[in-house]
Amino acid sequence: MSLKILHNINVIQQDASDLSATLWIRDGKIEKIESGLSSLPEGEFEFIDGQGHLLIPGMIDVHIHGANGFNMMDGSETSIQEVSKACARTGCTSFLVTSVSSTIEELVAMIRSVKRVIGHEVGAKIVGLHLEGPYLNPKRKGMQNERFLRHPNLTEMKDIFNEADGLIKMITIAPELPGGMELISFLKEMGVVIAIAHSDASYEEAKQAFAAGASHVTHCFNGMRPIHHRDPGLVVAAFEEEHVSLQAIVDGIHLHPAIVRMMHRLKGPNGMVLITDALQAMGLGDGNYVFGGHHVTVTEGVARLEDGTLASSTVTMNEALRLTVETGISLTDAVQMAATTPARILGLDTLGRISTGFDADLVLIDEQFQVQWTMIKGQIM
């Protein structure tokens, strides 16, 4: 049935308070938004009662590694599909399949699996690849496995791009490494989002990278030189550059609420992106896992290596949205950071907003931020 009428919902508006509305959805697109329901159309249609819940645009996770016990670096289609399903259940309608530093063979196997799955996803849609590494600084490696870290290699990078067939949308690097600036020049030509993290870049080195084309900071404050009043580092450089956006893992662990509020105050919702950075423990909880070549223990939802280093996260996108609001940031801004801003950064022109002509990628949530259903291209998952 091509026409769906979604009634009795509260819609998040970017420039206004919640709007009680009716949406007409046809062939996977938002056809019309009304403040009420004036009349019903002739012919067949599906009527959906939103029961007064809140409707938000589908959230977009630009940084996720796994979920429900499945790690997408294992090279299997099953793992990617399981993450797709987990994303949809938690209000995420699109995501970037994100790598960790590995051998070139493991990375290529993951890329090939993505190419086989894309277009056939059972849940959230894959909108590209985010390569986190392997050109990262061992000094700020975090949970990245030092065995696989190396200096930028343009020949290797070109081979990876050839393998990926245009799917690479974001790459996280440490620009201060030998060859880092040359890599930025190449990535700028390729039109991908150049992100910085796992980096010991000084303020001056970061400013040089941002001037050359870097425009994003992966999991801001984590995996980088901390702020010091005589050595401001990467974070302060990013705060000063209007074109640079920041990822935030809002899970109550990676960032103190005051830091989340400061990031929002300095960058606004247009310059901040909510992510999960989730490993395969998302959706399963406490236990022992193997991730990135490390043994990881999750206790009370916190993932750590044996030495205590934080190892990704277990937060979901709907939980990140709730926790962001609990810091004191408005729901309107939080939704923008979870959906609208990542869509803009990735150039996804028909996603991230509830607006006429946009894809009907929508999420119905209750007052506790629990997902009632997720709709992708007009289909409830």
Image (tube, grey):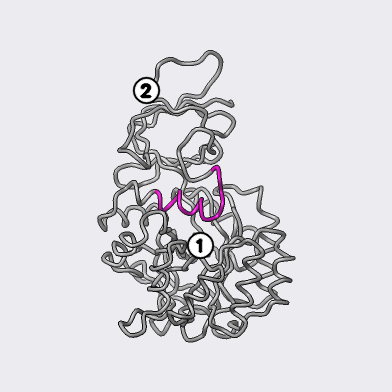
Tell me the residue at 69%/57% (across/down): 115
**Res. 96 image quadrant:** bottom right
Segment tinted magenta in the rendering: 336-350
- Residue at the disc numbered 1: 64
Tell me the residue at 41%/27% (across/down): 22
Along the horizontal axis of the image, is 178 left or right of 268?
right
**Residue closer to the observer: 340 or 130:** 340
Q: Nearer the viewer, mark 2 or mark 1?
A: 2
**Image position, residue 210 (x, y; %):** 50, 70
**Residue closer to the observer: 349 or 339:** 349
**Image position, residue 370 (x, y; %):** 36, 46
**Res. 165 image quadrant:** bottom right
Give me the C-alpha separation between circle 2 and circle 1.
38 Å
Along the horizontal axis of the image, is 188 left or right of 269?
right
**Residue closer to the observer: 29 or 261:** 261
**Image position, residue 267 (x, y; %):** 37, 60
Tell me the residue at 37%/29% (across/down): 21
Sequence-wise first label, 2 or 1? 2
Query: What is the secondary structure assignment of the residue under circle 1?
Result: strand
Q: Is residue 277 magenta?
A: no
75 lies above or below 381: below
Question: Neighbour class for label 2 at 10 Å: few (<14), some, many (≥20)?
Answer: some
375 lies above or below 24: below
Query: The residue under label 1 is which amino acid type?
Result: Ile
Q: Is residue 341 magenta?
A: yes
Query: The residue under label 2 is which amino acid type?
Result: Gly
**Res. 156 image quadrant:** bottom right
Query: What is the secondary structure assignment of the residue under circle 2?
Result: loop
- Magenta: main secondary structure: helix
- Residue at the disc numbered 2: 36
**Image position, residue 205 (x, y; %):** 49, 80
| Quadrant occupied by the N terminus | top right
